[in-house]
Image (cartoon, rainbow, N blue to C red):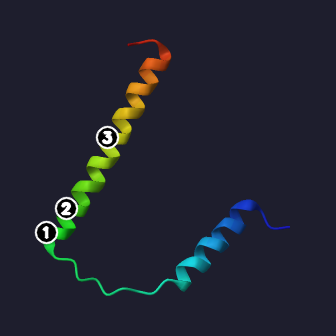
């Protein structure tokens, strides 16, 4: 019997094979904006998790 992780990998891999490959037309400004958005999103998520953890432990 196949494990759950293997089944999930097979499903995701098959979905990636079905998707069409798009030609990248990103300019430098688009790339910088995307990277900045990703960094800010990760930072915001970590900050919210830190506040939640402090409230849960009674430190705030």
The residue that label 1 is drawn on is 29
Residue at 36% x, 85% y: name it.
22
Task: Left or right? Give the position of 33 relative to 22.
Answer: left
**Mark 3 or 2, nearer chain start:** 2
* 8 relative position to 51: left or right: right
Q: Residue 21: give x, y in percent of width and height.
A: 41, 86
Q: Quadrant for the C terminus, please.
A: top left
Q: Are marks 2 and 1 in contact (CB under 8 Å)?
A: yes
17 relative to 20 in the view: left or right: right
Residue 53: x percent and y percent? 45, 25
Which structural element holds mark 2? helix
For the N terminus, the image quarter is: bottom right
What whole-number distance in Å separates the C-alpha atoms at marks 2 and 1?
6 Å
Which residue is rendered at x = 55% and y = 84% of the image?
17
Specify whether 9 is left or right of 47.
right
Residue position for label 2: 33
Whole-Å distance between the Cαs marked 3 and 2? 16 Å
Image spot of residue 25 (x, y percent): 23, 83
Q: Is residue 43 above or below residue 25?
A: above
Q: Which residue is mark 3?
A: 44
Task: Tell me the SS state at disc 3.
Answer: helix
Q: Residues within 10 Å of mark 3 (few under 14, many from 20)?
A: few
């Amino acid at each position: 019997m196949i494990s759950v992780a293997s089944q999930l990998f097979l499903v995701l891999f098959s979905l990636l094979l079905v998707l069409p490959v798009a030609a990248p037309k990103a300019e430098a400004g688009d790339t910088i904006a995307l990277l900045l958005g990703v960094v800010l999103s990760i930072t915001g998520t970590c900050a919210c998790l830190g506040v939640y953890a402090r409230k849960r432990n009674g430190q705030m």
